[in-house]
Image (cartoon, rainbow, N blue to C red):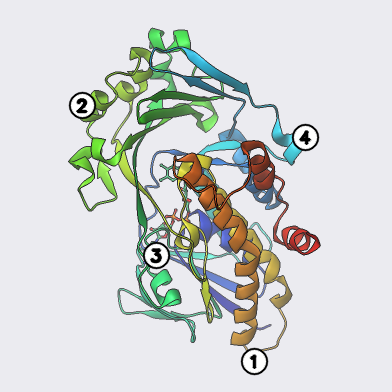
Amino acid sequence: MTTYNIIIIGAGIAGLAAAISLRHPTRRILLLEQSPLSTEIGATISLQPNASKLVARWGVSDLLAPLAMTDTAFSVYDLSGSLKTHVSLSSSMGTYGAERMIYHRQDLHAVLRERATSVEYEGLPAEVWVGKRVVGVDCEEGVVEISDGETVRGDLIIGADGIKSVTRGYVLGKEVAARLTGWSAYRMMVEMEDLVQDEAFVKVVDPRVSRTVMVVGDRRRMVMGPARGGKVYSVVALVPDEMGEGGGKGTSWVTKGDRGKMLDTFGDFPDWARAPLRLAQGEIGLWQLRDLDPLETWCKGRVILIGDSAHAMLPTQGQGGSQAIEDAEALGALFRELGGDEEGGGRWKREDVERINQEVFECRYERATTIQAYSRLAGGEDERAKVAMNPAEFMDYNCLYEGAIDWRRRQVVV
Ligand SMILES: Cc1cc2nc3c(=O)[nH]c(=O)nc-3n(C[C@H](O)[C@H](O)[C@H](O)COP(=O)(O)OP(=O)(O)OC[C@H]3O[C@@H](n4cnc5c(N)ncnc54)[C@H](O)[C@@H]3O)c2cc1C
């Protein structure tokens, strides 16, 4: 039986999800990852119902269930500590067929990696080579060059190398830099056993209850909630760049946050709300948030971009990872027809790969671009010309998604 080679550049959420979705008895899938992959950052990631339902179809619900938290409510406090809004998030299961789930990134990553590489599942297990930084891509020939000089050849090459993608430059024939959004985010974790000792915090918020708590001040906000089955409490604290370390002038995207400076920046927040900032474990990271303008295309020759390399977006809708999972599912669904036939004399024909890559792009582009624009709108930018939906309509647009084939059919019908 002929086997076909798929090279995935980057083993983040997009890359691993693509490896799962494309698994097949005739496909050898190799992921090239520049990092050692041992230290995915200590932060949470939410999967919205549109992505949760796709992940559930990959048969990993039993692995994820003990690690997941289902978000049940959303509470907003102001600087005086008063509760301004409380929205009970009724189960999305009935309306959208899946819940909004919160994971520790390391947990989600580990489960996706297991599902992609374990021999327990159907299809050839994917291989992950760590410490392999890709430095060049020949899109027409499907050849990928690694920094140690080695080259690997694939029938299909997937650029899942994140917002700073190297692959993007080869697909577009020019460098497209990510855009500063003016926001930075501190991200950190607190041990639940420490936080429940803080009487002031517990008096206002029971951290063991799975709900998202937001505290909003002038141009700053904290967003927090439990994760890892309630073992930890996760905090994202958003600040304008100029209030971050280095006054937003540094060139690095991720810096080590300074706890003293962070506590000063949130000095006018209620004392109880600052407790998690005081108690955070280990290093505090500070991310400068960037996104991309919509690209002209995501594909060239044998190569396609997915995830943040194609459409990095602000985290205001928690859709970045979810859109990466939708891309991955679309690849699996639309490449199904190139399953295991013997055409192509041992290699998938370039024109077949090109055609299907283009179909994936056309199926995904408008949706990902709309969600990108809405994420900017929610971040305070004027993107109304691009998104004519109110929040409820947008929620339906996001969550009533059933995969690429269904989406394509619905677009044609409309
Ligand atoms: C503060 C913040 C909060 C967020 N919260 C959420 C949320 O709640 N929900 C959500 O859905 N999304 C959220 N996101 C967005 C989400 O994290 C991203 O959209 C998602 O991680 C994208 O996955 P990816 O695999 O495309 O990219 P990445 O996760 O960046 O993975 C890319 C991988 O490629 C590797 N790589 C890069 N270059 C090379 C190379 N040259 N050679 C080999 N390997 C390479 C990298 O090491 C990395 O492992 C958030 C983002 C931020 C910044």
Q: In which quarter of the image is residue 117?
A: bottom right
Quadrant of the rendering where the N terminus is positioned:
bottom right
Residue type pointed to by label 2: Gly
Residue drawn at (62%, 47%) of the image:
388
Query: Of marks 1 and 4, which one's residue comes earlier in the chain?
Result: 4
Give the alpha-carbon distance from disc 1 to disc 3, as whole Å.
Answer: 32 Å
Query: Of marks 2 and 3, which one's residue comes earlier in the chain?
Result: 3
Ligand 1 lies under 8 Å from the Cβ of mark 3? yes
Of helix, strand and loop, which one carries label 3?
A: loop
Total number of numbered labels?
A: 4
Q: How crowded is mark 1: few (under 14 residues within 10 Å), some or many (20 or more)?
A: few
Residue type pointed to by label 1: Gly
Of helix, strand and loop, which one carries label 1?
A: loop
Instruction: List the residue tagged with mark 4.
Output: 94
Instruction: List the residue tagged with mark 3.
Output: 165
Instruction: List the residue tagged with mark 2.
Output: 260
Query: Of marks 1 and 3, which one's residue comes earlier in the chain?
Result: 3
Question: For the residues carrying marks 1 and 4, which lies nearer the camera in this image?
Answer: 4
Instruction: List the residue tagged with mark 1.
Output: 345
User: Does residue 75 show up?
Assistant: yes
Q: Residues within 10 Å of mark 2 (few under 14, many from 20)?
A: few
123 to 59, vertically: above or below = below
